[in-house]
Amino acid sequence: MSSTGTRIEFRDITKVFTSGSSEVRALDNINLTVEPGEILGVIGYSGAGKSTLVRLINGLDTPTSGELLLDGTDIVGMPESKLRTMRRNIGMIFQQFNLFSSRSAAGNIEYPLKLAGMEKQQRKARVADLLEFVGLADKGKSYPEQLSGGQKQRVGIARALATDPTLLLADEATSALDPETTQEVLSLLRRVNQELGLTIVVITHEMDVVRSIADKVAVMENGHIVEYGSVYEVFSDPQTHVAQRFVSSSLRNTPDQVEAEDLLTHDGRLFTIDLTEDSGFFEAASDLKAHGGTISIVHGGVTTLQHHSFGKMTVRLGGDGTAVQQFYTTLQKTTDIQEIMR
């Protein structure tokens, strides 16, 4: 089993596709490092450049310029014979599973081991171990059409692990699965990371996937990495519009337009407040009530990520106007507070 993961370095990577006289800059000056054993979530809308990024890592495509280092070795311009050897250290997991329908679950997992020249008895033992690892010890003889989507993806993960890689690439690996099954598959990938030490790059357009599994997140838009940091940093304080859209779709801790319009039909002033470990919200609320103001929570949510808690709270304030204004002025100094206006 693997003891350490692959280190990935993108150095000024650009990828331009040409079609006739037109050019598409799929990746533009990408600089990114993934440390061994890290799980990186790469998120972006369709056309952001995510899949191109993956194809460069496994050598299926070549950058127009720049360097791409795997464990210190630049694979740009590497001969195909050497790329094939390099790919043995990379496992791939796909959105549509890509299983051979004519092979059983065990046969699918065994296939890359045959290609690698492993002898039969050793192959059978390896396959049995992998089926056990992914929770499908009793499904080895089942064919893909007899398996659920989640079971197919578990077979896909077992197959990706067959040659004992140090890097796992998951390209939209949960997009075809329901939410519960998605969480089961992500839990398995996290276990792969923790127990086997693999580096994992997860390509997705779902922020919940990043939230569930990743250590770091790179937000892509139009071939650029527009935001990068720990999952906590990006979720708690997204800096770009695209990151803010992704985060809001996952956290749902602020009222949408319909909810806000309904809330505004009632008396009082509405404020949405960022809650962090040092926002000072509870102290300010206590002071408000001591001076004749009233406060009620009408919307919100708190999330814990990477041992930090954060969230947003929408509150209705009433009573003494001076106390309400003091509440607002006090919190402005320590956190982000926005009034929802009619």
Image: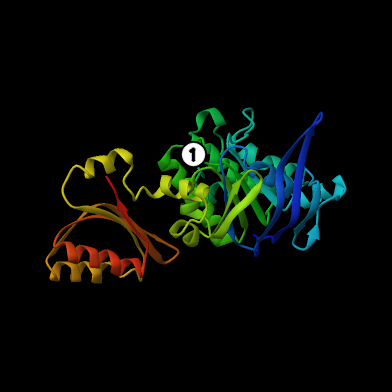
Residue 60 visible, this angle = no
Q: Which residue is mark 1?
A: 150
Q: 150 above or below 30?
A: above
Q: Is residue 164 visible?
A: yes
In the rendered image, the residue lying farthest to the front is: 322
Please state the horizontal and vertical placement of residue 103, each as a whole percent of the image.
63, 31
List x then y, in percent, for residue 305.
43, 61
Question: Residue at the spot x=41%, y=48% of the render?
Answer: 248
- Image: 156 above or below 143: below
Q: Nearer the viewer, residue 119 or 62?
A: 62
Task: Residue at 79% x, 45% y: name it.
Answer: 62
Against 116, residue 148 (above or below) is above
Q: Residue at x 51, y 35 (%)?
A: 176
Q: Position of residue 34 (x, y in %)?
A: 65, 60
Q: Amino acid at mark 1?
A: Gly
Residue 54, percent from left and from top = 68, 46
Q: Quadrant of the C terminus?
A: top left
